[in-house]
Amino acid sequence: MFKKILIANRGEIACRVIKTARKMGIKAVAVYSDADRNALHVSMADEAIHIGPPAASESYIVIDKIMDAIRQSGAEAVHPGYGFLSENPKFAEALKKANIAFIGPPVGAIEAMGDKITSKKLAQEANVSTVPGHMDLIEDAEEAVTISNSIGYPVMIKASAGGGGKGMRIAWNDDEAREGFQSSKNEAANSFGDDRIFIEKFVTQPRHIEIQVLADGHGNCIYLGERECSIQRRNQKVIEEAPSPFLDEETRKAMGEQSVALAKAVDYASAGTVEFIVDGDQNFYFLEMNTRLQVEHPVTELITGIDLVEQMIRVAYGEKLAIKQSDVKLNGWAMESRLYAEDPYRNFLPSIGRLTRYRPPAETTHDNGTIVRNDTGVFEGGEISMFYDPMIAKLCTWGKNRAQAIEAMGTALDTFEVEGIGHNLPFLSAVMDHPRFVSGNITTAFIEEEYPEGFEGATLSESVKHELAAIAAVINMIAQLRRTRISGAMTNHKRRVGKNWVVNLDGENFALSMKSKNEGAKVKFSDGNKVKILTDWRPGQKLLKAKINGQPIAVKVAATAGGYELRYRGATVCAQIMSPRMAELNTFMIEKVPADTSKQLLCPMPGLIVSINVKVGDEVQEGQALATVEAMKMENILRAERKTKVSKINAVAGDSLAVDEIIMEFE
């Protein structure tokens, strides 16, 4: 077996590979840029080598720098993780020439399957069902419009060398085809150094389901079931699960056998994923083959018990697969939630900054058999950089069935503490409780259909509102009792804490009375509802764990002026605790009105201005593109919200702006 391997990647996937290498007794070498000098993967590795400036184009995807790091370290093999150089045939060829093992597929398979156009042609030759489309390269935006019309809208514009949602746009008309072609081309050039574009039919009501394959260099190939990856935003996966709640055994077998046939057709060896779009009648169409480890591989590992990274290393060393198709059993259900540094309340725009608090749930097996796993590459005090993908962690849970896996995920998300940056924890929690998701009735349009005006937080039931109001009253009581003990000790005069309170939750009043008990209280509402709370929460703690009427609950708590901010299951509520007299007087308070920014275009995230598409004096229409901002390797087109006239432009292409800086103003 290899004695030392180098991981040509960063973040959570580098940490993930290091864990398996350590388990196998293999030394791991990390590489890092200036921005990653203090990164978690650097500290976890046995040794680390600096490879250049923060930009990936000057460090992580520069083949010569990685090759130099290999020579310095004496590594015998390289694991590329995903992204960066993982599907770059030139890198695999450079390793082959240097007699360094590539922990991935052969160069020929990467070339054949890594190019989406070539892979579709090969899939057709292997009798794999494919999506209708134009497989030849497209030269310019007008040709893209012509082809889109011949295929019929809607269409998907895709980068040939793309992946991870980058270089992909859906177009429903000619204008969107022109814009989508240029943005896809730009993103593809920036992310992959390859700006080739093709177009295919966009299947409506689609589900994104993929098959995990595993092959060795001796002609053996198996499939390890499927993953459902339909919860996506901007064509990038957010929540994955295995198996799919939609497939029957017959369709699973057909998809698996076609995936194996395709892998064998290109002499594939290593772990790989064949992606399909599946319609409502379980017709499936080949999308692409990812010749690498997938981000969502942990859910497959949880339901099969197979360490995919270990298998990749063994295959690269020349070993035969010790697993046969008949050995593969799908056990239970697994969920994965991708925790991103992005703000769901601002259309999932990227967020950067320092993690002032980062406390993931413990990785453990609970008494009921559920499992929690967290693949991460960050730590408390670390910085989320604008130079790389915004993923913070992949939180995974396993249960005996889908309902148990979902409930375990909801609880794990409740106890995941992240502060200092915008993040999508509230959205992930809201999805886990969404009736449509719980039912399994999902498509890739789930986010657009269920949150057409954007995510504004989860809607809480009346029973949950009562529970949160009771929690607010109890933590206020605990804080008051603490203050009375302190002041009483100083003055020799004991203050009393009242029993009757009014809790205002985002404008809705809940009148209640309470009776304190050891480690909690009994709360009775004026409408007759009763809640019994047991908790050992103390003032200053950010996470409250309690039992409400015997059921466990975890709520994030932050002190505010006059009350607390409570975060639970995708909802954030402000709780103001008042005496009955204060509540009566509060009705006369004047509501503060936020500033009017309707005549300004604000930069929605820290980023680089790629283009300004209008000039002063232009009359613009609703939906017209005004500017393009690039952040975390993704381009974001900013559009006019109404018909208006441009009066002032404050930025030019090439400017780096902070969040909420004014790009332009209107009359």
Image (cartoon, helix red, strand yellow):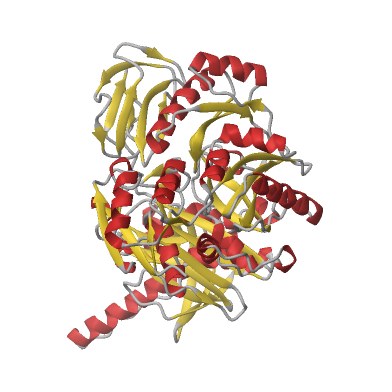
> Is residue 562 shown to the viewer in this render?
no
| Of 391 and 531, the residue lying toward us | 391
Please tell me in which quadrant of the rendered image residue 18 appears: bottom left
Residue 504 rendering spot, x and y as whole percentages: 44, 58
Q: Residue at x 55, y 61 (%)?
A: 315
Name, please, the residue furthest toward the right: 250
Q: Is residue 315 visible?
A: yes
Is the residue 605 above or below the residue 360 in the image? above
Residue 198, image x, y percentages:
55, 27
Between 205 and 434, the one lying in front of the other is 205
Above or below: residue 536 compared with residue 428: below
Nearer-the-camera pick, 107 or 252: 107
Q: How many marks?
A: 0
Q: Given the current orientation, which residue lies at the most extreme left position?
A: 490
> Looking at this view, is 502 or 439 the one in front?
439
Name which quarter of the figure residue 599 lies in. top left
Q: Is residue 97 left or right of residue 282?
A: left
Q: Is residue 237 above or below residue 517?
A: above
Residue 61 in picture, x, y percent from top left: 35, 44
**Residue at point 59% right, 69% down?**
529
Q: How far across and down, in percent of the image, does residue 75 sit?
A: 36, 62
Quadrant where the image shows the C terminus? top left
